[in-house]
Amino acid sequence: MTHPVDILLVVVILLNFLVLGTPALRLTIRGAAVQGAILAVLPLLVHRGFGWRVVAIAFATMAIKGLLIPGLLEKAMRDIHIRHEVEPYVGFVPSLFLCAVGTGLAILFAGNLPLAPEHVGTLLVPASLATLLSGFLVLTTRRKAISQVVGYLILENGIFIFGQLLIEAMPFLVEAGVLLDLFVGIFIMGIVINHIRQEFSSLDTELLSELKD
Amino acid sequence: MEIALVLLPLAGAVAAALVPSQRVRPLVVPAVAVLHAALFTTILAGGVSSGRGVWLRLDPLATVILGTVTVLFLLVAFYVPGYLELRPDRDNRIFCAVLLFFLAMTSLLALAQHLGLLWVAMEATTLATAPLLYFNRTARSLEATWKYLMIGSVGVAIALLGSLFLAYSAHLGGGEPSLLFEDLLAGAGSFSRPWLRAAFVLLLVGYGTKMGLAPLHTWKPDAYGEAPGLVGALLAGGMTNCAFLALLRVYRVVNAAGEGAFARELLVFMGLASIGLAAVFVVRQRDIKRMLAYSSVEHVGILVLGIGLGGIGVFGSLLHAINNGLTKGILFLAAGNIHRAYGSKSTDEISGAISRLPISGSLFLVGFFAITGSPPFGPFVSEFTIVNAAIGGGHPVAGTLFLVLLGIVFIGMGSTVLSAVQGRPGTASAGTPYKDDVARTAPILVAAALVLLLGLYLPAPLVTLLEKASAGLEARP
């Protein structure tokens, strides 16, 4: 029988495609939120042991990745009255294609690296790399500042999946620090987005091209 | 005991945020900086906490980098009140608090002996600098802040993945799960090589982005160009050195695992690429702050080049971290004064800076000679050591290329700097009432004196410290 972790990871990979393939900002934010919520459950399933640490991390992840950050982004979206990503630098269909290629490469790459016996055959490494690449794609191919933040969030989700391989080695303090940094980072990005809107009356990062040599 | 170096500036940041008066608040920054420097000296003199399992330790490598940051911050802190006096229109509450938060996080980063903690501190430093860049509240500074934030965050995210790869490499090697550098160094021999190599590449990209190595430097000209001069000094002399330290800590593990040769090849390549790119962009650069940004790209390239060459190059590189840090202090603070006086940072408007601002203009020229490696200043000694490491260590091509590129940068920067300081002041400078005074020039003078001193004489304790810090960073057979 397939491990429940792998089923969740397949959903995570499918969500990458959803986020890359839709112009609706609300859907991309929700996609990233669902992804974050799924990731919050992962530590519980990967480790079986319900130590207080694992539970605390799961709750914190759920709160930050699943609720707080998406809430922040949706609020920003409502304030600005922007609903759609128009004319990304790379179209929706080509970026879906790139995402598929990236996912394939991630699976190939992961197959070539030595793994600890307990991780052989799971999707943790390929899902992590595929999600990372998708996040990077969103970040680099979209014009709207909010979309770029969603890309950063998905990129971080990919790294979070990889972190599941190492939960014994990462002290609680560090893991909490990583989550806090992510939250504060996106909070600051939100503040900057707000200033961009006031300054340019738009969120198109195309307008941010004054500085060059 | 070391944790006090982090907690003191944190408390200072809170204090600065609570001070109600706009005029008194900037004074908190130098006050805390003095206490921080005193504490640093006390800990250094009183012996460093030993024993295993310590998360924060002032080891020789941390002493070199944090020492540089402490001195640079102290000088910048004394410049802060004079600078903010010129900007009474701006609320400086966030600015002062964040400056001290930046000091706390750079201290944490330098002292961190844990792979994860090191990363958390680097990310916090990144976030702390964003409000500093946006101090001027213009569309241009907003653009610079956004680019810095996005590129920096992605870079640091890649460094996190690299750290996890390194941890997994250690996990596969067996042994107890610990990410303290002392444990990583001890167990490095059995690490999984493919993961370790991938980890180093990712960490080089991640921390290299924060250092501003080419081709990951794209945020740098924008950020340094739009930030206030004193923030540029802290970024170019402080943050890049901290990112360099993070890279060194990781490199030491890779070297201990026997993959040093692979890492050194990458470092030499990235180093020369950065110096080469700076040489291309510094020529005909009319914006003096952007010119300094490309000079910073050049010098972080020199830092990793020295490590990549190995041998005495490591010593030269660590010495250069000190020299570069302090010289960037001279250049950015002097450039900031010139910017204020002319209301512009382009050589289209700036000319005759020496007659308009005798002290700042002359110091800008001194900083230029120092940073381009002219004797008798400090950077000459460290760059000469690195050239020696190249020629004497069997890298004649790299050594020659390095010298040629240094020559190009000298000529390129020279034409910009000379056209700014020579001649007669144009009409543009008449409009601003700015005048040089003690508050805004004394810190630059002290920095220049230190850079000159380091060029004339290397104290024996400093040499011993640099030799100790080089341990584990040299090439291993």
Image: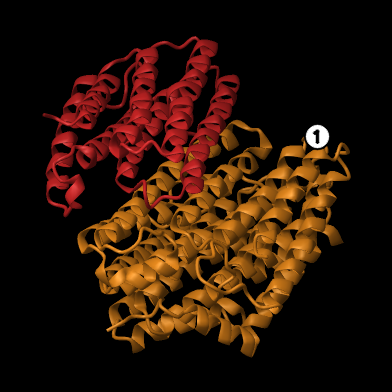
Is residue A117 placed above or below A126 in the rendered structure? below
Counting from the top left corner in percent of width and height, residue B386 is at 43, 80
Counting from the top left corner in percent of width and height, residue B8 is at 73, 55
Q: Is residue B454 left or right of residue B76?
A: left
Q: Is residue B352 visible?
A: no
Q: Nearer the viewer, residue B466 or A205?
A: B466
Is residue B45 placed above or below B458 in the rendered structure? above
Q: Nearer the viewer, residue A203 or A46?
A: A46
Is residue A160 placed above or below B289 in the rendered structure? above
Q: Quadrant of residue B90?
A: top right
Q: Quadrant of residue B332?
A: bottom right
Q: Nearer the viewer, residue A23 or A2?
A: A2
Counting from the top left corner in percent of width and height, residue B349 is at 65, 48
Q: Nearer the viewer, residue A182 or B335?
A: A182
The residue under the point 50% across, 65% down is B53
Counting from the top left corner in percent of width and height, residue B202 is at 32, 53
Q: Is residue B458 left or right of residue A167?
A: right
SS of the residue under disc 1: loop
Q: Is residue A202 left or right of residue B276?
A: right
Quadrant location of the C terminus of chain B? bottom left
Mark 1 Cα shell of 10 Å, populated few (<14), some (14-19), many (≥20): few
Q: Chain of mark 1?
A: B
Quadrant location of the N terminus of chain B? bottom right
Amino acid, disc 1:
Asp
Q: Is residue A27 left or right of residue A197?
A: left
Instruction: Indicate the chain coloured orange by its letter.
Output: B
The residue under the point 47% across, 21% down is A67
The residue under the point 46% across, 44% down is A175
Residue that numbered label 1 is attached to: B89
Q: Is residue A136 visible?
A: yes
Instruction: Indicate the chain coloured red by its letter.
Output: A
Colour pattern of the rendering: by chain
